[in-house]
């Protein structure tokens, strides 16, 4: 089954404790991206990657890092999480930017 | 840069009534436009997309959208709402030049019985 898998689904952490949210897709997609969803703001892009070893900042990249060492995986790293990063995070993949994006189930992160 | 405006953060309709969710975009190039739906506690899934083949686009679950270049709009409609249509709907435009998919703020659709 074609899917995008994110882990964990829920995470509560403390300020400053490094964390990684994993994202994996099995569709051989070139394009992957991370979004955060906040009420009234829709989805805002954090980082995206057009291919292996190619990543670029989205609209809200501060406080986040990503890597794309292999095509299927695109982890999101928060080196020092802060409470303003409490949000719902989605990973998505697509063949390329003009085609349908497939979304993971989301990761609800709470930073206290 | 591309941008998307969804008019109305909440829309409420009666079961069986017409659903109309509004989306306006700004784009300096021919746009690729999408509507996604998000059910509670789930990720987004594609309802339909416009890729310049036809101005009236049909999607899943009886939804359709019409691309109107003169109005820079891509409104989503469904003739008869079902209770199962209650969800949040997002309009999005892709910006190939910048490698971005830009979303609107979303519209929560409530269907009353």
Image: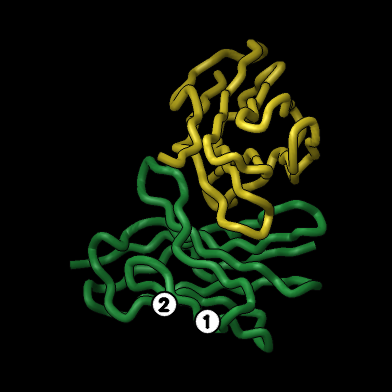
Secondary structure state at the residue bearing disc 1 = strand
Residue at image coords 72%, 41%: A48
The residue indicated by pointer 2 is B77
Against A19, residue A1 (above or below) is: below
- Describe residue A32's horizontal placement relative to residue B10 as left or right: right
Residue at image coords 67%, 56%: B102
Q: Disc 2 and disc 1: Cα gap in Å?
A: 9 Å
The quarter of the displayed image where residue A21 is located: top right
The residue indicated by pointer 1 is B66
Against B4, residue A90 (above or below) is: above
The quarter in which the C terminus of chain B is drawn is: bottom left
The quarter in which the N terminus of chain B is drawn is: bottom right
- Chain letter, colour green: B
The quarter of the displayed image where residue A24 is located: top right
Q: Colour of chain A?
A: yellow
Residue at image coords 23%, 63%: B83
Q: Can residue A88 be spotted in the picture?
A: no
Q: Residue B10 at what x, y percent from top left?
A: 43, 63
**Residues at badges 2 and 1 in contact (C-beta under 8 Å)?**
yes
Q: Residue A52 at what x, y percent from top left?
A: 75, 33
Number of the label disc, if any, that sits on residue B113: none
């Amino acid at each position: 089954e074609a899917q995008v898998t994110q882990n964990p689904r829920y995470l509560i952490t403390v300020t400053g404790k490094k964390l990684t949210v994993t994202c994996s897709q099995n569709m051989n997609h070139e394009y992957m991206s991370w979004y955060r969803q906040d009420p009234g703001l829709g989805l805002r892009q954090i980082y995206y990657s057009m291919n292996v070893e190619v990543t670029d900042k989205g609209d809200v990249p501060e406080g986040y890092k990503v890597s794309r060492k292999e095509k299927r995986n695109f982890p999101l790293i928060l080196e020092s999480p802060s409470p303003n990063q409490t949000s719902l995070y989605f990973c998505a993949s697509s063949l390329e930017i003009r085609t349908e994006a497939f979304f993971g189930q989301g990761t609800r992160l709470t930073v206290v | 840069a591309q941008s998307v405006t969804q008019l109305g953060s909440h829309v409420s309709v009666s079961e069986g009534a017409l659903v109309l969710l509004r989306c306006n975009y700004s784009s300096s190039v021919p746009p690729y436009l999408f509507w996604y739906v998000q059910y509670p506690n789930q990720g987004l899934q594609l309802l339909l997309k416009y890729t310049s083949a036809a101005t009236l686009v049909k999607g899943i679950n009886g939804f359709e959208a019409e691309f109107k270049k003169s109005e820079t709009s891509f409104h989503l409609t469904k003739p008869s709402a079902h209770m199962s249509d209650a969800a949040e709907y997002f309009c999005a435009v892709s910006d190939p030049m910048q490698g971005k998919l830009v979303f609107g703020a979303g519209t929560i659709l409530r269907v009353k019985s």
